[in-house]
Amino acid sequence: MYNFRFSIPTTIYFGKGQISHLSELAKYGSKALLVYGGGSIKRNGIYDTAMKILGDAGVRVTELSGVEPNPRIETVRKGVQLCKTQSIDMVLAIGGGSTIDCAKVVAAGALYEGDAWDLVIDPVKITKALPIFSVLTLSATGSEMDAFAVISDMTKNEKWGTAGDALKPTMSVLDPTYTFSVSKKQTAAGTADMMSHTFESYFTKEPGCDVQARFAEGLLKTMIKYGPIALAEPDNYDARANLMWAASHAINGLIADGSKPAWCVHPMEHELSAFYDITHGEGLAILTPVWMEFVLKKDPSTAVNFAVYGRNVWGISGDDDMEIAEEAIDRTRKFFTESMGLPANLRAVGIHSDEHFKVMAEKATKGSAGFFVPLTSADVVEIYKAAF
Ligand code: NZQ
Ligand code: ZN
């Protein structure tokens, strides 16, 4: 296990009615930028509740609405402009990962002299940010409790993740009832996303990280148990609560710190989103089983890792690691497609041509040094083709 620094400064208020704690924003100033998406928070009533609490607490609100799924740099720039011209004290995101990510970069951009895109492509430039708060409405990305933000410039087919301690929210409200209205498609995609975050850290060649691995297995079992229940019963509190809390822990450092994982499937998916604007979790569900098969074939010594996964997460028994590994991958694919109704291939999400695969693969392997199994850009083209 490597040395590490584990730091989560985010206060979490978890459960029904915890939105009342938005009154605490008054401690941070009197002007908040409220960031939200296409209007789901108005339809399910969270907007009205939040506005009342903020108003009663004496916090004045300026709005940045219309944040896109796969949030755009243009929207971030609008938010930065509002913060600078209106002397905003803090940024409050109400929504899913896209809204929270946009709010994070707005908060950093507000205290940065140059263009906000600099902060997306060069995390070192993120040294400070306005205080960030979130009310989470979709369980998936973990943005509510992590240091990351992912922003796109669709004019250049660029989608990059950035990170910084300053991007960790000061406080996040996690009320599972706020996710009752999430569609089946987004519930399934969110479950695939949190599972992928777990896989990205879990599949590592670093030995001796048992704490991280056993936590990861517990998270995966929870996601596999409750994902289908949330699909069948959207207002099942326990299902929504367990997914919500599992998603936060999948990416807050708990299972990654100490094993230095280099994420591999995410860079491949970010290229799909950058070129085709698809739903992040759907892209991950398509690529993950294909990636697993590819690395097992390329490096058969990984049968040990996939067999541990098969035994501990899926309860597969037997002595032959390779057989268990193959069955575990098969179960993963069936879980995504059959239990969660996620798309099985790239054509199912509207990608009908391989014309960009080469350039996408080159970008996806830029930071490939620490991958679980090192992949060349030619390997990634193979993975895209197999996912086709
Ligand atoms: O925009 P609104 O109207 O709010 O609707 C959203 C959006 O259409 C809707 N939605 C959210 N909460 C809802 C709801 N609809 C009904 N009821 C609710 N309670 O769901 C749609 C998708 O929302 P979005 O925020 O885009 O989804 P998600 O949370 O999956 O975020 C995806 C983005 O996060 C990035 C992804 O790349 C993608 O851009 N990621 C961020 C990460 C991070 N910050 O750590 C890590 C991830 O790996 C990921 O890359
Ligand atoms: Zn993700």
Image (cartoon, helix red, strand yellow):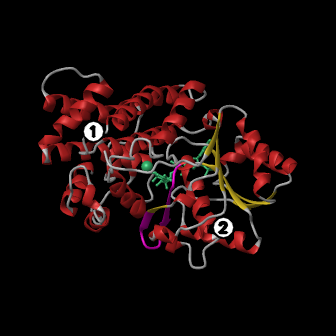
What secondary structure characterizes most of the magenta part?
strand
Residue at numbered disc 2: 79
Taking the magenta stretch, the answer to whether it contains residue 149 is yes
Asked if residue 342 lies in the magenta stretch, the reply is no
Q: Earlier in the sequence, mark 1 or mark 2?
A: 2
285 and 4: which is toward the camera: 4
Task: Locate residue 234: give its quadrant.
Answer: top right
Q: In the figure, is residue 290 to the left or right of 244?
A: left
User: Residue at 39% of width from left, 47% of height from top?
Assistant: 257
Highlighted range, magenta: 146-160
10 Å neighbourhood of mark 1: few (<14), some, or many (≥20)? Answer: few
Q: Nearer the viewer, mark 1 or mark 2?
A: 1
Residue 24 rendering spot, x and y as whole percentages: 76, 47
Tell me if mark 2 has few (under 14), some (14-19) or many (20+) residues whose alpha carbon lies within 10 angstroms of its own: many
* Horizontal and vertical percent position of residue 60: 82, 58
30 or 288, nearer to the observer: 30
| Residue that mark 1 sits on | 208
Number of numbered discs: 2
Looking at the picture, how far across and down is residue 290, in whole percent? 25, 45
Q: Are marks 1 and 2 in contact (CB under 8 Å)?
A: no
Amino acid type, label 1: Gly
Amino acid identity at mark 2: Gly
